[in-house]
Image: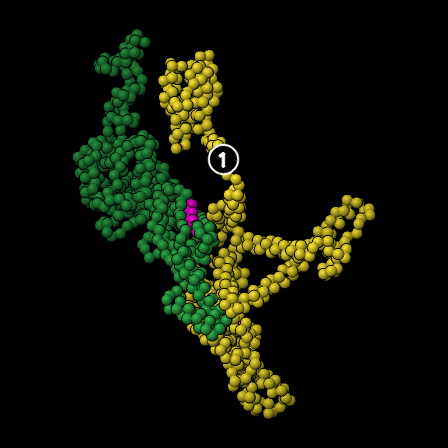
Chain colours: A green, B yellow
Amino acid sequence: MLNRAWLTLTLALIVAALLFREASVLLAALALLLAQLASWIWGRYALTGVTYERSLSEQRAFFGEQVTLDVRAANRKLLPLAWLSIEDEFPLALRLVRGRLAPSHKPQRMLLNNLLTLRWYERITRRYRINCIARGEHIFGPVKLRTGDVFGFVWREEDNNETAKLIVYPRVLPVGGQEIPSNQLIGLVRARRRIVEDPLRLAGIREYAPGDPMRRIHWKATARQGELQSKLLEPSTTADILLLLNVSTFDPPWLGLREDRLELAIITVASLANRELLAGHPVGLIANSNAYGADQAVRILPGRDPGQFQRIIEALARMTPFERHSFPAFLRKQMRNCAWGTTAVVVSGILTDELAATLVRLRRAGRDVTLVLVGDDEPRPVLPGIPVLLVSGEQEWRDMDAIALR
Amino acid sequence: MRLRFAERLPGFPLLPALIAMAEFAWAYLWMAWVSGLQATGLVRPALSWPASAALILVSILLTRWLLPRSDSRRLSTGMIVLAAGVVAILVVAWLNAGSPRLGADTLRHLPDRLASSPGTDIALAFGAYLWWRGIAIARADWYFDDLTFRFGSGVAALMAGLFANGLTDSTLGAGALSLLALQYFTAMLPALALAHLRDIRREHGADGSGLGLSREWVAVLAITVLGIALVSAIIASSLSFDLASTIRTPMTWVADALVFVVLVIALPIGYLVAAMIWLVRLLIARGGPVQPFNPPVQPDNLKPGNNQSGKNPLPDFVFGAGKWVLLAIVIVVIGSIVVRAMFRYRSRHGDDVEEIHESLWPGGSLLAMALGWLLLQLRRLWPHRRPELALQATGTMPIEPTVRTVREAYRAWLVAASGMGRGRRASETPDEFIPSGLALVPDGGGDLLLLTRAYEVARYAPSSLTEEIEEMARRSWQRLRTRLPGGTGEQP
């Protein structure tokens, strides 16, 4: 209605009403003019002073937790807004505890629609609870604001490209069953096998026995006891554990994705990393996939500093389900750059012939390799010299209490 | 609690009713114009406004009621309506014929009688038209785009009808024409807004929470539409030199309504309060003699010139002004209650999500803004302070506790230094005073330096002082104090 033709017609009517001294026509024409004026004012100033904010109570959450999403729309002017339509993009994988989402034309996205009436100098906050039921880096936004006059003649749109990010970590479960063996002779953690003793790890003293080297003599204890005493040393091992995750669940990978199997593989990696770090082992992570927004494959070198688990679990949370490199070739390349003595724990949902050959070749080259095969229907393969551990529960990973390495 | 008419009035066809009232406005204009033509020669519209409005509204309600019913029910109701229409035609024709004795000729002469009564024909035709339009409007699912087209065509029909009625001998007066014009806009504009609202909700899959017929939305719409109607009426009246009567008439209505409110609300409350006072006094007297209950206001006292003393102790203009003040207070109180009920902010736990409304007024509220403005004006009227007073005022400006501690510690050091015969000169900066201070406490150089630096930050730095610096300065002074001759010095 707000166009030149209507305005011209209205003014012509006013002139005609004045000429013919028709008060009723003048009244109607003025009402029409004022309605147009009101629409024009709304069209021009509706979005002035209108702000939209989105805030999450937590930036990071574990699988199954709930976080609060506050959306705030404010109108910082005297002109009220009869309607304000807010279309905020919402990740498809997450669910609202209460409230509904509308479909979006964008893949993997939904729309959180809010329709509000904002009075003068008013702010409305809507509080949603979100169920974190999917691992990943979830992006909220961008948002489209649309408003206009109360009659619907004019409207204005504004896109706000600010986004909020929520990282949902994978499940971390206790790991039971078999241990991951380590073959390194000297390291930081006490080993059960007494092959080589660690000169830095003193277990006690004993009487000198002929044949003990001079450097084994504990001189202070000898002075105190009055006779020669030898140091009793502990054996140790450094299980530098490198977790290698294969995100492919089909061979060839373009056939599709077994989401449950991949999630179970990721949970297994996270749980193993947690257990080994708590046990004092340096743990690293390499995967043939990249994080959201990154162009490099995930690569975290072994370490055991307090922030290592955070780095690993965050990388797992943000990992995309698409393979960036063929895993066997990727494995060969990564192991070339890996320190000697590192225990490579390969976690995979499939075992292809090429992967099996690569593992055997690595073992023959002296590498310490363990295969963790994830999936309900996977038989235990026989790979010479390579321990194979199985993890099942592909369909029940949401309700599992522990990871069992068989 | 959110006001939702859709919940309060389930199934009420608000949008069709508004559209019908808008369409009815211009249709009625044309019917009135046809009624006033020489061929018909009527002095009033063939069908009155209340009857026409009732007819179209009943048609809408009946149609809406029938829509979800079975076909047999629709058929039977349709037959009843048809029969009622036929009976109405017969009765009208019979009444127009002077209600003759019923006989065989009554039906035979019906066409002649209808032909000789144009008013009846127009009324029946207009009634049938309204009935048909009511059904059509009630059956349609209205979208905003449809309504914008109808708004344009309706404006054209309305203007043409107004011109036709105004320029020829019409059965409607100027006031009625204006009211019909206002009826069109006050019905069609909310109908457009409502249709637009429904379109938005449809677009969002009807699951976007909020933006129902909330009181906020209704308030914005009502203020806008009524504002348009009022402003256009005032401007049109002023341009047609009829402003005084236009303004006076609604003001009289408002005054009458307020007097009614006073009589209905204030007087019963007065009686109630007096009765309660009497009851309390009775309880205090424990059954003893009590002054009988006299109502504070007797109906006879309200009559002019009938007060008890026989003479009004106040001048008439004071008495009259008092009444208007009382009336204004009543208006303000009632208006405040209504506005507060309509616009108060609240936190709501809705169907889906928690919703919190907050005011963003800079001063917290409109009242605070008004008070702030008033204080500003009063301050402007106040005599300006002299410069030295301004300096004093600056000196008493509130400072942060951390800054105060550091400055007091340094002043205490200056007092101690002055007591030892080497006070800081006015022209001397704190940094320049360090060598003199070192001469007084040779082994406290580090603490003196720390205290001086902290004081410089507290005195001159634009940013606020951290608690670490405050603690450092306090400890420096404590250590410095012990090194002073005699270990004296003020505790900051």
Percent x, y of residue B466 = 41, 29
| Secondary structure that dominates the magenta span | strand
In the picture as drawn, the residue positioned furthest to the right comes out as: B289
Percent x, y of residue A234 = 28, 22
Q: Quadrant of the N terminus of chain A?
A: bottom left
Q: Residue at x 48, y 48 (%)?
A: B361
> B460 or B192, which is in the foreground?
B460
Q: Is residue A247 visible?
A: yes
Q: In screen coordinates, is B77 left or right of B257?
A: left
Residue segment shown in magenta: A66-75
Magenta span contains residue A68: yes
Reading the image, the residue beneath label 1 is B386
Q: Residue at x 28, y 50 (%)?
A: A257
> A386 or B262, which is in the foreground?
B262
Q: In screen coordinates, is B331 left or right of A11?
A: right
Quarter residue A155 falls in: bottom left
Q: Is residue B76 visible?
A: no
Q: Residue at x 47, y 50 (%)?
A: A122
Residue A337 sits above or below residue B15 on the image: above
Q: Residue at x 47, y 54 (%)?
A: A119
Q: In screen coordinates, is B410 left or right of A291?
A: right
Q: Quadrant of the C terminus of chain A?
A: top left
